[in-house]
Amino acid sequence: MPDFVSALAAATLQPGKGESVLLNGRRIAVFNVGGEFFALDDDCPHRGGPLGPGWLDAEQCKVACPLHGWEFDLRTGACLTVPARPVRSHPVRVADGWVEVAI
Ligand code: FES
């Protein structure tokens, strides 16, 4: 069973938005897609861009890196632009109004 760490209050991240947070010294990008939360390493494998402030496509459940546009599946971390360069995804749960991420 992974250890879950509180990332942010669920009510502070509106649907269709992402945010970068620091958890145990690691940059993690958390996203809200229609009330469902996802978490990826906030470190684009291209050149380290932050994915939290990327362009979220809720319909396709993907985010585009704000630096050069590489796209990632929020559910798996798969890179849709360069399949050999995925980003790590993390299990997420909501408990007592907090989004918690297993890192
Ligand atoms: S740093 Fe993310 S696409 Fe270049």
Image (cartoon, rainbow, N blue to C red):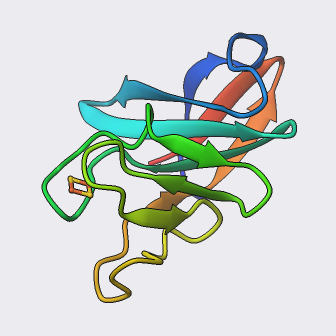
User: Vertically, is 71 above or below 4?
Assistant: below
Q: Is residue 91 above or below residue 11?
A: below
Q: Quadrant of ligand 1?
A: bottom left
Residue 4 in the image, given as x and y percentages of width and height:
58, 40
Residue lying farthest to the front in this orientation? 68
Residue 4 visible in the snapshot: no
Quarter of the figure with residue 27: top left
Q: Identify the residue shown where x is 13% and y is 56%.
A: 47
Please provide percent x and percent y for residue 42: 34, 44
Please give left or right for residue 10 compared with residue 49 in the image.
Answer: right
Residue 94 sits in which quadrant? top right
Q: Residue at x 75, y 21 (%)?
A: 14
Q: Is residue 102 left or right of residue 96?
A: left
The spot of residue 67 in percent (x, y) is: 25, 45
Q: Nearer the viewer, residue 61 or 38?
A: 61
Please state which of residues 57 and 15 is positioned toward the viewer in this rendering. Answer: 57
